[in-house]
Each structure stands twice: as structure tokens, then as C-alpha cells.
Amino acid sequence: MGTHPFLSPGWIEAAMALRDELAPTAPAARQRARVNLVVTGTPFGDGRFQAYIDTEAGGPLPVPGNLEDPDATVVLDYPAALAAFVTDDPDVVAHGFLTGALRVDGDLALVLILFGEGMSEEQIAFAQHAQARLQAITDLK
């Protein structure tokens, strides 16, 4: 499959194939969440990448595009997105939140549930497996 820079067209294609493979095995969410993601400062295209997560339609894995009337919208810069979805670096994510490079418009509590707070052991194991698979397709140089 090879590796690709995070959010490059090749990476998105590989990530969607991974999503298609993993989504059927995703544990059920404790609560439905519909969240739009906007990544700013990407080195590809117009510098923005939009995706969404709908836990009832494929689990916790993002899909390019956006939802109408989401529960929340998470706007984050490229380094914070890489840290949140691929490298699992909570310090970078926290720094992004504190400096405004990561912000949540909408239901913050629901976003916290979706991204770790209150996840079951099965959900945590799935998230760790998915993240390891994302790391395997990501050129981190």
C-alpha cells in the first residue's frame, strides 16, 4: 500500500480503503455523534480538508465531506489533526486547544465522548488498532 503524506490525495485514498475494511468491525458507539471536521493549513489543495464522522454510518472513522446540521464542528490545524488522528500526541492536541488552533463549535461534551472520554475497552482497542493502521500508511518524515 505504501506511505503517503498526511491528507495528501494518496493518503486519503488509502485511508478510505482502510475505513471500508475496518468500519464493519467498529464497536457500536454509546451515543450517536455527527461531527464535521475542518483541517486548516494543509499543504494540499486549497489548504483546507473537510471530513465528517457519523457514528451510526461507519463508526468513528472520518469520511471526506461534511454533514448538514452536525452536533459539532471541530476546526483544527494540520499539526493538531496529525497528532489527533495518526501520531496520538496529546501534548500537541492540548497545545492546539489552548492556543486556538483547535476549537469546537457545538456540543463539546459529545466530542469528548467521541474522542476518548467514556470509551469502552472495546472502543479503545479498536481506535488504537485503527490509529496503528493509519500510522502504517502515513509518511511521517
Image (cartoon, rainbow, N blue to C red):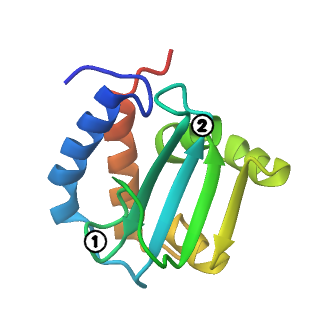
**Residue at the limit of the structure toward the front, as seen here:** 46
Find the residue positioned furthest to the bottom: 31
Placement of 93 over or under 9, stated as above or below: below
Nearest the camera: 129 or 23? 23
Circles 2 and 1 in contact, beta carbons < 8 Å: no
Residue 12 image position (x, y, % from top left): 32, 37
Disc 2 secondary structure class: helix
Q: In this view, does 14 lie to the left or right of 54?
A: left
Residue occupied by mark 1: 27
Label 2 sits on what residue type? Tyr
Q: Which mark is residue 78?
A: 2
Image x and y of residue 102, in percent: 70, 52
Whole-angstrom CA distance, mark 2 to mark 1, is: 28 Å
Residue 114 % position (x, y): 50, 70
Residue 9 to residue 32: above or below: above
* Quadrant of the snapshot with the N terminus: top left
Residue 26's quadrant in the figure?
Answer: bottom left
Nearer-the-camera pick, 68 or 79: 68
Mark closest to the chain's N terminus, 2 or 1: 1
- Residue at the image position 43 percent from the left and 74 percent from the top: 68
**Which label sits in the foreground, 2 or 1?**
2
Q: Is residue 109 above or below residue 63?
A: below
Secondary structure category for the residue under label 1: loop
Where residue 60 sits, quadrant-wise, is bottom left
- Where is residue 129? Give x, y as percent: 33, 49
Q: Which residue is drawn at 28% across and 71% down?
A: 27
84 lies left or right of 22? right
Residue 46 shows in this picture: yes
Regarding residue 117, the answer to whether it shows in the image is no
